Amino acid sequence: NAGVTQTPKFQVLKTGQSMTLQCAQDMNHEYMSWYRQDPGMGLRLIHYSVGAGITDQGEVPNGYNVSRSTTEDFPLRLLSAAPSQTSVYFCASKLGNTEAFFGQGTRLTVV
Amino acid sequence: KQEVTQIPAALSVPEGENLVLNCSFTDSAIYNLQWFRQDPGKGLTSLLLIQSSQREQTSGRLNASLDKSSGRSTLYIAASQPGDSATYLCATRGSQGNLIFGKGTKLSVKP
């Protein structure tokens, strides 16, 4: 099993550009989520999904969209990048109340 | 609203020392508590998961305990090594199925 795979690892965007951060898991986990990690703020939930076709907002959803068409994939879309979205983004998955697994992260810089 | 606190924010110890990392939470009605390790520029690696019905979990030199009544968990690291240097994060399940994280303890083990 590859676990949780995120691409790309690094990305630089210009303000106003859009992009999609990819996340895939091969563990058949029904729950997937996106977090951002910022210095002094810790990890904060952006969006989450409890299964294919079901998504919901987390603590900091503004400026981001998600979809969940399959169990395996949970992409995060930045609609119009802003410098405030400079951060490290992590995707995670889990099954019920069991152990959560994280991807290696995407380091995004918006200039 | 659940809040998770980790004190101290940073800890430096000599190699070989046994040490304890602390995690406290405000709402004792938790499903579980998970400890992670994060190396600089890397993702989160799961260390131990303690379900609410358990008092402790062990993996190698690591032992995590859970005391729901006092809202505390501790991660005990025996015979610390320089390779243990990392940031340690604890997290408990939130109402949206997500993880609510503390801000971490940055551990430095000096040779």
Image (cartoon, rainbow, N blue to C red):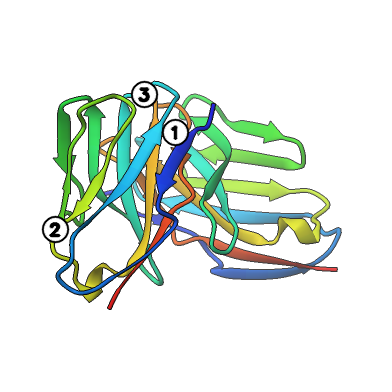
Q: Nearer the viewer, mark 2 or mark 1?
A: 2
Residue B29, position as x, y percentages in the image = 34, 35
Q: Is residue B14 shown to the viewer in this render? A: yes
Residue B99 to residue B39: above or below: above
Q: Mark 1 or mark 3, which is nearer to you?
A: 3
* Pointer 1 chain: B
Q: Residues within 10 Å of mark 1 (few under 14, many from 20)?
A: many
Label 2 chain ID: A
Give the Cα distance between marks 2 and 3.
Answer: 30 Å
Residue position for label 1: B32
Q: Nearer the viewer, mark 2 or mark 3?
A: 2
- Secondary structure under badge 2? loop
Question: CA–CA distance between discs 1 and 3?
Answer: 11 Å
Circle 2 residue: A79
Label 2: how many Cα within 10 Å (few below 14, some 14–19, many 20+): some
Kindly give the residue lying farthest to the top in the view shown: A28
Residue B68 can be seen, yes or no: no
Q: In this view of the protein, which residue sits in the foreground, A90 or B22?
A: A90
- Quarter of the image where one finds residue A70: top left
